[in-house]
């Protein structure tokens, strides 16, 4: 702590300078008012004051109790209504307790234990270093002994061989051999010296490493010793300026309680500690003791957290979970192109992108514990039994998917579809030689891509129908992609084999490009040649399906609460919401409580694909169920639960979450549109209110219409739904200036009345091609027109005359087209435009004329331009509007 002078210290503890100098003098310290006071001098003074007042000096008493009394007069109204004075005496007692001797002994014991552990670690390290050194020395000696013995043995053998050879050599050979021996000994000696030098260097390196290790240990032990001493000094150091002020003031108060200064302080803060009042007055001058200061240090690197994100979250809450400021999150989202505010709700996808952009790990969570509880209450019989395969029929439009299925079912489903085109998902189950197969018939038109994808996800096997005379088409490729994405096996049905132009080899070659290899070519895909018209190969196709299902070993529990997927849903005027459900496990019974996405309800009735009422349905059986609270989305999971009340709560919770997510996305879209409109200007919109008979058609049509949008004209679906066109739909269309489109539905009487009154555009369709084409034409009419300039005439300047009224008059010969006085002109010199304007006069001889045709002479006066020269060309043009189309 910094040193302070006597005057400042007197102000800190609330006494006079003279009194403080007198106390210093009594303690044997001579001071002036401007002298500095050290910590040691403060401690000496405090020790003197303590002893002077009966204390034990610097050790201090183990316990100190202070008692104070204050009297005051209160005016109290008695029962008679007269006021009388009442004397009130307030007694206060404060006790200060010092650290006990036992705590000091515990502290000393802890420090001694730490010292003992440190010494043991040091001894252990020294012992390990000595053992390592001894081990290295022993290894070195053993190695040297082994090398020496090997060398002696080799030398002995060499001498013996040399002597034996010398006995058989001539004198010249002996001399040469001796010379070679001397050279070999020299080389061997050099090699031994090099090896010895290398061994010495290795020993030095090991010694250096041991020395460095010892130095590191010594430095670590020295650092630990310094930290231990520092902790001891911190623990022993309790006297600071603040504590000195508190104890000195309490001692003085106990001795002289009637003093003027203390009386004033007591009136100011009667129920608080005097030191607290002093501390509040001198808050900026006092500093907390080292033992009470926080040891927090600012992190040197960014802290990366695991961020849990639910379906929706506010920007402020996301910032809190990432431990960053909200402004940082807003700034990051602005860099990513999202204009948000601190209290705005964002959806899960946007929050995940922001968190990952800022380097955090994202954990997607579901907050609905009730939903988890309801789903966990479901029970299924653990025993699985074989089930029927679910087969999806896919292929390009008009390749014969529905006709193939018709032949199998011996029914004419295709004739019931508008234009012979399948526009809904149909589910049927048939009995083939005692084996059950469930078929899903998906539309083949490009607009129903999402429906085909949903069909592939609910299926086990895909039959891809390809016309032998047409080959692989775009939707055929999409079907292959959907099947691969769902991870289901393919069976190729080459249809229309009864036609003359059928070429099955072409189909195989084109599909081989997509890695769909036939079995006869070494692949794993079955190819079956069929004809949906004559029934050729249909039995082989069904046999291939049954063989593939045996390989898959399909099974599902048949006993227990059912679970499945919604294939299609619609609103029936007489029966209410109707959902087509494919049961995937368990058994669905009439009367069960079903939770389907955002809707719930008790199954009031069940029907099969033929419209017959049934009581129960097992795995792989498609059924229509009645009794739901609303129309579920196609693709939603259908789950049977126990408690209807809990099912309603889960459905309501999901609806609320869905609404929050929708609002979050709408808000995002509004902000994005605001900035888009600022930069791009206004964009024309075709508003559409769409009603259809089933949910799948709405998805397909909405997707197709949205894809028609361009930078200039956009299609906006302001309202959509399943069922007939109602008065509410017509009112919405009137408010938003929208076209009302009905797909396989009609408007009721009240809706037609509103449509007639508001003069709305109402269109009915039963084929999706016509709908898309007419909307396309409506959008073409909203395109901004294109203007094009066409040259209608050209005149050559032959001479120039001066007119006092008009100025320069150009005598011209019309070489092309016609010159009109009302049309704008350009003056060209050497094929470069030098002026653009309009004609002031056009004369032939002395008469004003409206136009002059090719091959005639005329006089032309150019308005506000007098620099016409001989040889210039005057070009006359018109601006023509060109109608645009999408």
Image (spheres, rainbow, N blue to C red):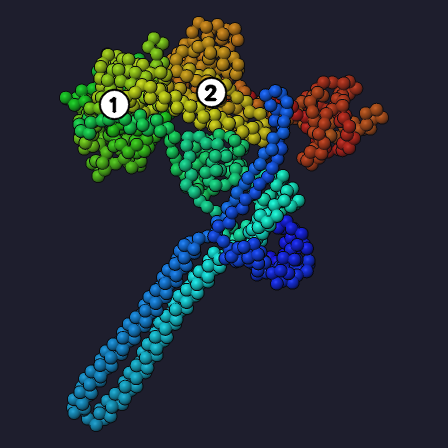
Between marks 2 and 1, how big is the CA–CA gap? 36 Å
Q: Nearer the viewer, residue 470 or 618?
A: 618
**For residue 30, side relative to residue 322 (left or right):** right
User: Does residue 225 appear to the left or right of 172 in the view shown?
Assistant: right
| Vertical position of residue 123 compared to residue 13: above or below | below
Residue in the picture at 48% in, 34% down? 317
Q: How many marks?
A: 2
Q: Quadrant of the N terminus?
A: bottom right
**Residue 846 occupies quadrant:** top right
Measured as percent of width and height from the top left, residue 430 is found at: 20, 19
Task: Answer above or below: position of 358 versus 231.
Answer: above
Foreground pick, 752 / 343: 343
Most foreground residue, 168 or 841: 168
Residue under label 1? 562
Q: Name the residue: 63% across, 39% down.
A: 268
Badge 2 is on which residue?
717
Q: Is residue 472 visible?
A: no
Mark identifier at residue 635: none
**Marks 2 and 1, the one that precedes in the sequence:** 1
Q: Position of residue 420 (x, y in %)?
A: 32, 16
């Amino acid at each position: 702590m910094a040193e302070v002078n006597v005057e400042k210290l007197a102000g800190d503890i609330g006494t006079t300078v003279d009194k403080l100098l007198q106390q210093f003098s009594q303690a044997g310290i001579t001071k002036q008012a401007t002298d500095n006071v050290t910590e040691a001098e403060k401690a000496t003074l405090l020790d003197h004051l303590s002893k002077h007042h009966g204390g034990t000096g610097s050790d201090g008493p183990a316990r100190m109790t202070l008692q104070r009394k204050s009297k005051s007069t209160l005016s109290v109204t008695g029962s008679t209504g007269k006021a009388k004075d009442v004397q009130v005496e307030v007694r206060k007692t404060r006790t200060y307790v010092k650290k006990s001797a036992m705590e000091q002994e515990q502290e000393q014991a802890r420090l001694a234990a730490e010292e003992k552990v440190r010494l043991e670690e040091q001894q252990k390290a020294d012992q390990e270093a000595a053992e390592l050194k001894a081990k290295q020395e022993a290894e070195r000696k053993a190695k040297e002994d082994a090398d020496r013995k090997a060398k002696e043995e080799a030398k002995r053998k060499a001498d013996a061989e040399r002597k034996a050879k010398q006995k058989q050599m001539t004198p010249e050979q002996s001399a040469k051999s001796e010379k070679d021996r001397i050279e070999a000994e020299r080389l061997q000696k050099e090699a031994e010296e090099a090896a010895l030098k290398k061994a010495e260097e290795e020993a030095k390196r090991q010694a250096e490493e041991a020395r460095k290790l010892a130095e590191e240990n010594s430095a670590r032990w020295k650092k630990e010793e310094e930290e231990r001493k520092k902790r001891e000094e911190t623990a022993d150091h309790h006297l600071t300026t603040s504590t000195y002020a508190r104890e000195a003031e309490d001692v003085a108060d106990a001795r002289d309680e009637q003093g003027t200064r203390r009386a004033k302080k007591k009136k100011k803060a009667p129920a608080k500690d005097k030191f607290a009042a002093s501390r509040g007055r001198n808050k900026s001058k006092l500093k907390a003791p080292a033992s009470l200061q926080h040891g927090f240090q600012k992190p040197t690197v960014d802290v990366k957290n695991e961020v849990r994100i639910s379906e929706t979250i506010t920007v402020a809450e996301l910032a809190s979970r990432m431990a960053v400021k909200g402004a940082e999150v807003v700034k990051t989202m602005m860099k990513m192109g999202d204009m948000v505010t601190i209290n705005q709700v964002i959806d899960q996808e946007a929050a995940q992108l922001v968190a990952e952009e800022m380097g955090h790990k994202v954990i997607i969570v579901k907050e609905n514990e009730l939903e988890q509880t309801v789903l966990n209450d479901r029970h299924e019989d653990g025993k699985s039994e074989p089930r029927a395969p679910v087969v999806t029929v896919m292929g390009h439009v008009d390749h014969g998917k529905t006709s193939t299925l018709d032949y199998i079912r011996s029914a004419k489903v295709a004739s019931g579809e508008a234009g012979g085109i399948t526009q809904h998902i149909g589910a049927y189950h048939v009995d083939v030689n005692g084996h059950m197969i469930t078929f899903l018939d998906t539309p083949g038109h490009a607009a129903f891509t999402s429906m085909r994808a949903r069909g592939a996800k609910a299926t086990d096997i895909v039959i891809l129908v390809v016309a032998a005379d047409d080959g692989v088409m775009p939707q055929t490729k999409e079907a292959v992609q959907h099947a691969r994405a769902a991870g289901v096996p393919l069976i190729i049905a080459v249809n229309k084999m009864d036609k003359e132009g059928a070429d099955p080899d072409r189909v195989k070659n084109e599909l081989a490009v997509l890695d769909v290899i036939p079995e006869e070519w070494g692949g794993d895909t079955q190819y079956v040649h069929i004809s949906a018209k004559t029934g050729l190969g249909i039995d082989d196709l069904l046999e291939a399906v049954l063989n593939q299902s045996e390989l898959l070993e399909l099974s599902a529990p048949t006993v227990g609460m059912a679970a499945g997927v919604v294939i299609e849903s619609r609103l029936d005027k007489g029966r209410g919401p109707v959902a087509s459900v494919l049961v995937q496990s368990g058994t669905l019974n009439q009367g069960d409580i079903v939770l389907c996405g955002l809707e719930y309800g008790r199954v009031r009735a069940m029907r099969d694909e033929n419209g017959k009422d049934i009581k129960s349905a097992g795995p792989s059986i498609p059924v229509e169920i009645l009794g739901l609270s609303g129309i579920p989305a196609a693709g939603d999971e259908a789950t049977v639960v126990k408690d209807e009340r809990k099912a309603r709560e889960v459905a309501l919770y999901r609806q609320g979450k869905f609404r929050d997510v929708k609002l979050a996305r709408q808000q995002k879209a509004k902000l994005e549109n605001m900035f888009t409109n600022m930069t791009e200007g206004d964009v024309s919109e075709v508003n559409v209110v769409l009603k259809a008979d089933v949910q799948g058609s709405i998805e397909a049509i909405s997707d197709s219409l949205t894809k028609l949008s361009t930078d200039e004209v956009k299609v906006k679906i302001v309202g959509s739904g399943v069922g007939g066109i109602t008065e509410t739909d017509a009112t919405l269309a009137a408010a938003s200036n929208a076209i009302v489109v009905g797909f396989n539905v009609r408007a009721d009487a009240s809706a037609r009345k509103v449509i007639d009154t508001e003069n709305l555009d109402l269109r009915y369709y039963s084929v999706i091609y016509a709908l898309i084409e007419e909307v396309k034409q409506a959008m073409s009419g909203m395109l901004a027109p294109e203007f094009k300039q066409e040259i209608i005439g050209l005149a050559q300047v032959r001479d120039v005359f001066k007119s006092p009224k008009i100025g320069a008059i150009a005598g011209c010969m019309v070489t092309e087209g016609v010159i009109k006085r009302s049309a704008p002109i350009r003056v060209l010199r050497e094929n470069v435009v030098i002026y653009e304007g309009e004609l002031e006069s056009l004369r032939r001889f002395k008469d004003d004329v409206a136009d002059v045709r090719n091959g005639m002479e005329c006089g032309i006066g150019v308005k506000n331009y007098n620099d016409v020269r001989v040889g210039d060309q005057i070009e006359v043009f018109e601006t023509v509007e060109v109608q645009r189309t999408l």
